[in-house]
Image: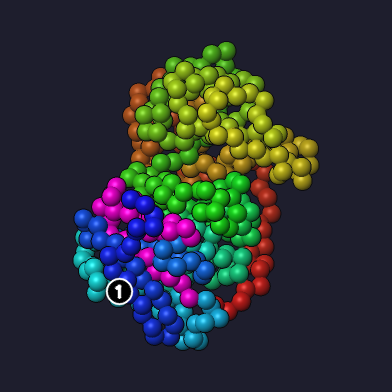
Amino acid sequence: MKKSNLSFDLTITHISNNEIDYGIIFGRDHQKILIIKTDLEDSVYGYKSEYIQFAYELRDSYGFTVVSASTPSPSNVAPSSSCSDQMAELACIVSSEIGIIDATKIYFIGISQGATVGCLGHASFPQISRFLLINPQLAYYTRKICRSVQNYEGEMMTFVFGKFDPSAPLARHLKSYKHKNIHAAIIPEIDYIFSRNYYQLQDLAESTILRKRSYIKIFVYGKSFAELPNFAKTILDYIIKNKDEILVGDSDDTDILIQKYLESKAYNNITFYCNGDTPKNNFVTSAKIQSCAERTKILPNKVAESVYLQQMSDDCDLIISILDEKVYLAWDGVNDIVEKNINCIKELNLSVPIDISLGTKHYGPWYVKQSEPKAFEIIEEDF
């Protein structure tokens, strides 16, 4: 179907304190609802019909009923209107036009100002179980967003920033809330307008709120070996079977053995970390590269040598250290998906004992605790 022929099954304009447009596409399953909250300059159709095209794809591929809601400019919003008011009104529209029961699954995607509204007003629409918030205005509402995240009790709230978005550097403030099903990601080479950089909205949704299993990131490293021990291969085979992401460093010993083994298994859900712009060793051509070059430049030499290792510790959910006569597992002790993985690894009947460190994954000799960043440095405006 051509984009020019796409239309909503139902359109509504609601005027109270402000004017908000709603467009609804009814799917085959009215109990699976996805809400799109647009940015300020976007209509419910989206830039080049992006939102309505996405709505049709969700309907056809997943059976979703999709609601697209516009977002009024803050300058046009009456003082009594707020993020909570917009989310409460949205809840009323969904309830009256579609219906909400206990079995209803409701997901939310917000873009920029729409993402900000979703985050700050989530308590007014508690039936939403998963949020995907794309480039919310964290730089303007730092304290309010962090406070809202702290109070979030839902299933998943995922923040995604383009690397060149002004709020991206502040994403670090969200990392401390990982244990509350809060996730934050920065996508390279993308600014604050994802769609105009040809990054597909459906790709983001399918890798976050639409995913059926919570995949984790596992940092695997080990002592120098002439060849990879069989018990290490057993662990890697388990990770491959689960399709979890493997983080590998750039040393000249065990990291090379791990890379070569993963290549022999044709596994490509791998990220190589390095201090330079490119890794010294790369035996899996399809692997992603995470360069720590910029961070390395601003640190003393002794600290800079292990920057990529420390970055891997920060980014991963679980560390697996392969030693001569034991396997060492380290994690934060708060992620139930990681805990299930650890229990499964314990049942692999490895030929070596397993030591588990709970409550921290920053145990390696490379880890240098940095001074805490000053939170809420941005002077925020009233919303």
* Kind of residue at disc 1: Ile
Residue 343 versus residue 234 in the image, above or below: below
Q: Secondary structure at mark 1?
A: helix
**Which residues are drawn in magenta?**
47-72
Instruction: State yes or no: residue 59 in magenta.
Output: yes
Q: Residue at x 49, y 86 (%)?
A: 78
Is 82 placed above or below 112 here? below
Residue 110, quarter of the rendered image:
bottom left
Q: Residue at x 42, y 80 (%)?
A: 19
Q: Nearer the viewer, residue 269 or 312?
A: 269
Give yes or no for residue 179 being in the magenta stretch: no
Residue 171 visible in the snapshot: no
Left or right: where does residue 135 sit relative to residue 291? Answer: left
Residue 321 image offset from top left, x and y in percent: 52, 30
Q: Quadrant of the C terminus?
A: bottom right
Residue at 52% across, 45% down: 360
Indicate whether 46 appears above or below 368: below
